[in-house]
């Protein structure tokens, strides 16, 4: 018997053929048999709720490339404390190496379990290595060994879990063969809810979908999404399952189910790994799974999601809070890029108070298909190391002095620099190590701290594994100084839950040139994503609203009607992106933007460090809406927004605020007339009491207006 406590409250227990991992909030256990590990328990310690049936006989996972006749010959358990190269909070990592006799050959499957101190969730994933090659994972740890031989039990389920079906329906009672987790739910009276996500935002503007229902003992139900929750209808507690992978639009197994209810048995479907991924001798990692417990109410569900992301990428204000500009949003593409242009852009960005300037596609010598210089049907979108191998050299004509003058000017103005970069997707990212060297050289020579990763197109789990290795190696080599802006606008990419902790999600390309930019559309996408992603993990754009007014004709919600400051403020609770040539702003636009940025900037890192959640109505262009950043139980920020709504007053329910509490509001900035900014610099304070429903009343005298407060509960 082994009992081992590793970091704070995180522990491992091994007794015979049973394994437990957990902390003060959650514990999960398995029994090992010849067929593999079997989930025995998920225990919510706070609410004292056991979620799994104790009679479960079904293996935890099943993969189509692992023969049903494969025998588990032994399992070794290895543990260590890791922090994902400094990106995550430290956690207990437990590797369970499972050796299978697979059609006369040895096949190793590594089950990796991750437990975070004080947090009520446990993550796991699988790594697969065919043949006798050694795992690429480096581990410093102590090891214990589990070994057993047991008679093979026929069948995949116990009688308790069998569906009660007539003979003509028996075929529907069989479990599928590609799942990463199987949870035999003990409780019948539960409500489930599934949240689906969409990326590829060039062609999608409705990013969230939801389904819900009740458990039914005979139901075969397939669901698509990354998040599923179960809540007891009779008692306390909730169970959350996250599939750590791309959205269905980026799934490597198109048409695959993500969650499957087989009566009360819930499985997380689709590892993403195919037989072809196992032929190279390289380690390939499956989609991951998070299982967590919460109190059962909506606020505790949101807090668990926030805690989950904050553990995977802990918040560092100096790294994760910035105000960026990128010139691509004015549709000049790379046609305007040259040394002189960027020097005046740097000055304009400095005048506005921006902290980071990113140079998009065109700084490099190579020509992409998006370049103004690309011939019809020409330009590269992969195979960047073909030809003379100088694709990633600095463009010699546009920057005859290299990037040194830009780097020096940026340093003098205390502005950091970013670059556009496209990982080479050819042959499943076979050149990932070359990409690592390229990125490290650019970081070292030009002090680049943010790389926009574009052109990502993942075709296999092998390719995805290599892409993630590229990001990890850059993070490791730079001590976490480099941030990736992970483009989610097109092609097959990582989505929102698919190992995106190495950077910030670049969510949208929107252009007034095409008439597809509206501030309320961008706000709505932010508003709907915030329950599931921290605000600092999203990069949201605001454009020059005076451009292309003719593209919107008589549209009452056209961007120029709301004004330039309004466009900024609807994304002020994210890593805001000035998606424009800042030199193209008029003097009045620049003046009013700089005043707004000056007022918000001191609070920006604190706001992003809080738990940001949506308020009011879903943005529609004609709603009362807003955002709340919760700093602690007493303090936070409120951004109250009146879109083109007829009423001048509205009462909102706030998160985590006692419904009888009086709030002390400190006004930071207000706008009730287009681009007329009232910056109070914290001098104006008001007391706000709730109404009979516990909602707080706000007033804004005109449409397209807002007010930003810092609040404190005073009683």
Image (tube, rainbow, N blue to C red):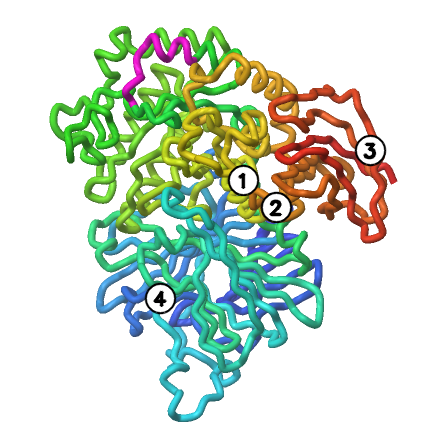
Residue tagged by mark 3? 664
Residue tagged by mark 2? 117
Residue 285 placement, left or right of 60: left
Between the C-alphas of marks 4 and 2, the distance is 31 Å
Q: Tell me what residue is drawn at x 28 percent, y 45 percent.
A: 463
Q: Mark 1 or mark 4: which comes first in sequence?
A: 4
The residue lying toward the viewer, choosing from 525 and 515, is 515
Residue 325 % position (x, y) = 45, 22
Local crowd size for mark 3, using a 10 Å CA cut-off: few (<14), some (14–19), many (≥20): some
Q: Mark 4 or mark 2: which comes first in sequence?
A: 2
Secondary structure category for the residue under label 4: loop
Residue 365 is covered by the magenta coloring = no
Q: Tell me what residue is drawn at x 81 percent, y 27 percent.
A: 685
Residue tagged by mark 1? 520
| Residue 459, placed above or below residue 89 | below
Q: Mark 2 or mark 1: which comes first in sequence?
A: 2
Task: Find residue 353 and name its label.
Answer: none
The residue lying toward the viewer, choosing from 175 and 683, is 683
Marks 2, 3: nearer the viewer: 3
Q: Tell me what residue is drawn at x 24 percent, y 39 percent.
A: 425
Residue tagged by mark 4? 178
The residue lying toward the viewer, choosing from 457 and 651, is 651
| Residue 29, placed above or below residue 436 | below
Secondary structure category for the residue under label 2: loop
Between the C-alphas of marks 1 and 4, the distance is 41 Å
Q: Does the image show residue 143?
A: no
| Residue 665, placed above or below residue 29 | above
Marks 1, 4: nearer the viewer: 1
Secondary structure category for the residue under label 3: strand
């Amino acid at each position: 018997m082994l009992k081992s406590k590793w970091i704070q409250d995180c522990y491992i227990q091994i007794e015979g053929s049973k394994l437990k991992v957990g902390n003060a909030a959650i514990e999960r256990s398995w029994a090992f048999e010849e067929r593999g590990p079997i989930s025995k328990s998920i225990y919510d310690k706070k609410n004292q709720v056991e979620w799994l049936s104790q009679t479960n006989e079904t293996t935890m996972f099943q993969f189509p490339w692992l023969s049903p006749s494969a025998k588990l010959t032994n399992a070794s358990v290895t543990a260590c404390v890791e922090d994902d190269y400094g990106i995550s909070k430290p956690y207990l990592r437990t590797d369970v190496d499972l050796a299978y006799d697979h059609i006369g050959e040895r096949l190793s499957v590594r089950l990796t379990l991750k437990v975070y101190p004080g947090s009520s969730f446990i993550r796991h994933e699988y790594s697969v290595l065919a043949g006798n090659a050694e795992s690429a994972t480096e581990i410093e740890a102590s090891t214990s060994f589990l070994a057993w031989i047991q008679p093979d039990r026929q069948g995949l389920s116990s009688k308790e879990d069998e569906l009660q079906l007539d003979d003509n329906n028996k075929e529907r009672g069989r479990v599928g063969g590609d799942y990463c987790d199987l949870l035999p739910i003990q409780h019948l009276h539960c409500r489930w809810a599934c949240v689906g996500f969409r990326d590829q935002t060039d062609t999608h503007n409705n990013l969230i979908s939801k389904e819900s229902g009740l458990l039914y003992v005979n139901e075969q139900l397939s669901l698509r999404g990354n998040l599923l929750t179960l809540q007891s209808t009779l008692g306390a507690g909730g169970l959350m399952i996250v599939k750590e992978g791309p959205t269905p639009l980026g799934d490597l197994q198109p048409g695959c189910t993500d969650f499957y209810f087989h009566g009360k048995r819930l499985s997380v479907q689709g590892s993403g790994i195919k037989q072809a991924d196992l032929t190279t001798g390289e380690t390939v990692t499956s989609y991951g799974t998070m299982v967590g417990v919460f109190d059962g109410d909506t606020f505790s569900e949101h807090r668990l999601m926030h805690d989950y992301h904050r553990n995977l990428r802990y918040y560092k204000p100096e790294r994760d809070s910035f105000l960026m500009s990128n010139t691509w949003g004015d549709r000049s593409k790379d046609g305007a890029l040259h040394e002189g242009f960027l020097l005046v852009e740097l000055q304009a960005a400095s005048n506005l108070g921006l902290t980071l300037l990113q140079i998009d596609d065109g700084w490099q010598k190579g020509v992409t298909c998006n370049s103004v210089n690309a011939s019809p049907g020409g330009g590269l979108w992969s195979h960047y190391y073909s030809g003379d191998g100088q694709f990633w050299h600095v463009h010699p004509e546009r920057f005859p002095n290299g990037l040194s003058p830009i780097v020096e000017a940026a340093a003098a103005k205390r502005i950091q620099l970013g670059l556009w970069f496209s990982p080479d997707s050819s042959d499943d990212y076979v050149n990932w190590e070359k990409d690592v060297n390229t990125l490290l050289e650019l970081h070292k020579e030009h002090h680049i701290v943010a790389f926009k990763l574009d052109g990502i197109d993942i075709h296999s789990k092998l390719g995805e594994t290599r892409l993630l290795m590229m990001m990890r190696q850059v993070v490791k080599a730079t001590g976490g100084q480099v941030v990736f802006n992970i483009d989610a606008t097109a092609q097959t990419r990582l989505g929102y839950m698919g190992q995106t902790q190495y950077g910030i999600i670049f969510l949208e390309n929107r252009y007034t040139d095409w008439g597809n930019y509206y501030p309320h559309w961008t706000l709505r996408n932010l508003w709907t994503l915030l329950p599931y992603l921290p605000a600092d993990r999203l990069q949201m754009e605001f454009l020059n609203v005076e451009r292309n007014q003719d593209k919107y004709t008589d549209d009452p919600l056209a961007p120029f009607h709301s004004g330039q400051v309004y466009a900024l403020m609807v994304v002020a609770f994210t890593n805001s992106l000035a998606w424009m040539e800042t030199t193209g702003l008029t003097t009045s636009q620049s003046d009013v933007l700089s005043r707004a940025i000056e007022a918000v900037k001191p609070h920006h890192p604190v706001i992003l460090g809080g738990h940001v959640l949506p308020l009011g109505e879903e943005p529609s262009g004609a709603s009362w809406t807003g955002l709340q950043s919760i700093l602690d139980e007493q303090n936070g920020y409120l951004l109250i927004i009146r879109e083109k709504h007829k009423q001048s007053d509205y009462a909102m329910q706030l998160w985590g605020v006692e419904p009888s509490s009086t709030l002390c509001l400190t006004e930071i900035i207000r706008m009730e007339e287009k681009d007329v900014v009232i910056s109070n610099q914290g001098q104006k304070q008001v007391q706000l009491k709730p109404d009979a429903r516990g909602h707080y009343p706000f007033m804004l005298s005109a449409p397209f207006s807002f007010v930003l407060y810092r609040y404190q509960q005073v009683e």
